[in-house]
Every structure is written in C-alpha cells, then in structure tokens.
Amino acid sequence: MNMLVAALLFQAAQADYAEAMKKVAARFTGKEGVVIHLGDSITYANQYGGWARSGKGKTPQEEAALKWMHCNDNNDSDGWFLARVDRPGNRSDTAVSGIRSYEFLEGGKGGIPPMAEVVKKFNPQIGVVMLGTNDVNGGRSPAQYKGDLTKIVDLLTANGTIPIVSTLPPIKGKDDAVKAFNAVLMEVVKEKKIPFIDYYGEIVKRRPADWLGTLISDDGVHPTGDHGGASASSEPTEDNLKNSGYLLRGVLSVRKIAEVKAKVLDGARRK
C-alpha cells in the first residue's frame, strides 16, 4: 500500500468514526472521563504525560478536556497517572517496557494482568493504544500485528470503551517495516471506524529526513524529551513540536481525546 492510498484510507475512516463510536459509547457504564493509555515504554515514560499535567500554552478547551479526564488527580480515574506510576516489573498499571501486542493481550510480562482484566479494573470511557514497536523489533509480521490489534480494539469496544489507536513512530533502520505495520493499522482504523493519531505522519511531516536525534532519540526508538530548547512540557509552538518527540505525542493525544469527547460524547449528551 503506497502512502497516498494510506492517507486516503485515514481520511475516509476519520470522516465516519463519530457515528460508529456513538454506538460503542452507548454501552459504557463506568465513570465519565476515565481515559487510559495502553502501550509500551513510550507510554510508560513520565515525559509522555508531561504536557497534559503541567505543560504550557493550553487553550481553555484543552484545559477543560484535561479536567474532564481527571488529569492530576493521581488516582485510578487519572489515566495519565496510571500510565506513568511505577510498579514492579518495569511497568505501570497500563504500560509495560518491551511489551509486544500479543503479550499485552495475554498479560504476564512484568506482572501485568491480561488486558481484559486491566480494562475491567479501570473501565475506561476512552482507551488510547500505541503498541507495535516491540513487535517490529521482534521480527513479527504485519499480519500478526493486525490480528492482535483487531483483538485489542474489539476488547475495548465490547466494554463500551472508545479506542484511539496511534501509528508507530519511526525506528532507526526499520522504516519499511514500520510503514508496513502502520499500513495494517490503517486497515483496522477503516474496518472498525475508529479514531486515530497519526504520530508517524506528524513526525515525518516536521522532520522528513532528520527525525533521528531530533524527535526520536539517538537510540532510534524512543521519542526525545528535552531537545533543541524544547521539553515535554513546553508551549506547543511549531518550533518546539519539531524538537521534542514527547511534547508532540502528548499534545496530539490531548487534542485527539478532546476531539473525540466533542464529536462523540458531548453530542450524545445533547440529544
């Protein structure tokens, strides 16, 4: 699949996710505003939630969305807390360093329970998912990844949880594999009519040829925190968004969650 076709698939999927997700939201029975972040070390990192918790330059709408999602409550209702809190096993309550997508479903790595138990425990209204980097590095196939991601999305929607899936960021020396994984992620987005964050696209749009060492750290995998005068909690100016990979991811997540709230949940309440 070429990138033009992939982009068109994304556009088509985003045009119609609201109606599909309103049907998912109608099944939700938990506490309003609980938004969890499911992933690996890129989600477990404290910097991921830096802008949400204490970042500069938020709009009133973004501040309101963060209050709605219990940001800085530092409890089981606060998904930013659940993603970063340290638990034995190099993990948090919702993210595990080095985990692959099938391991997240099965549980066990680092002592994390199976995903079904995590979802049952926290019963989120929205679940932000970014898994797959360790699948790429582990030599798994795009087809295997698509199967796992489909199960993850289905598990969330069966709970009445709206999934927001994120494309994988670039990996040093593995751009073709990352593109292949992101292509099948696009297929899931289209098939399931779910919202997404195109983290990969936002990185390469800003740094098409020099993302390594700027938005992605020199290890070739993890986003940067402090770089080029920007940090994970800096004001989201275009210059800063070109220099801190965690700032970029955090801002994109907050804005997408706010968008889904406005398009799906607020609209449902107004009816």
Image (tube, helix red, strand yellow):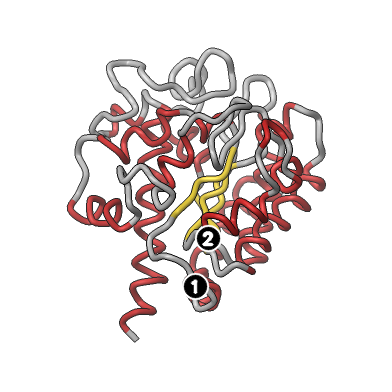
Q: From the viewer's perspective, is 193 left or right of 269?
A: right
Residue located at (51% from left, 32% from top): 44
**Dot 2 alpha-carbon crowd within 10 angstroms: few under 14, some 14 to 19, many 20 or more:** many
State the residue in front, 39 or 18.
39
Residue at point 48%, 20% (across, down): 210
Please state if 11 lies on the left or on the right of 172 as rendered: left
Identify residue type, mark 2: Asn
Judging by the rendered image, the residue that carries numbered circle 1 is: 29
Which kind of residue does numbered mark 1 sit on?
A: Thr
Q: Position of residue 71 (x, y in %)?
A: 32, 47
Q: In the drawing, does residue 10 fall left or right of residue 253?
A: right
Callout 2 touching callout 1 (CB < 8 Å): yes
- The answer to which image quadrant residue 159 occupies is bottom right
Residue placed under numbered mark 2 in the picture: 123
Gap in Å between the C-alphas at discs 2 and 1? 8 Å
In the image, is residue 109 above or below residue 34? above
What is the quadrant of the C terminus in the image?
bottom left
**Residue 54 in the image: x percent, y percent?**
25, 35
- Location of residue 227 in the rendering, given as x and y in whole percent from the top left corner: 36, 16
Residue 171, above or below 1: above
Are there few (<14), some (14-19), or many (20+) residues within 10 Å of tag 1?
few
Instruction: Tell me which label, 2 or 1, sits earlier in the chain.
Output: 1
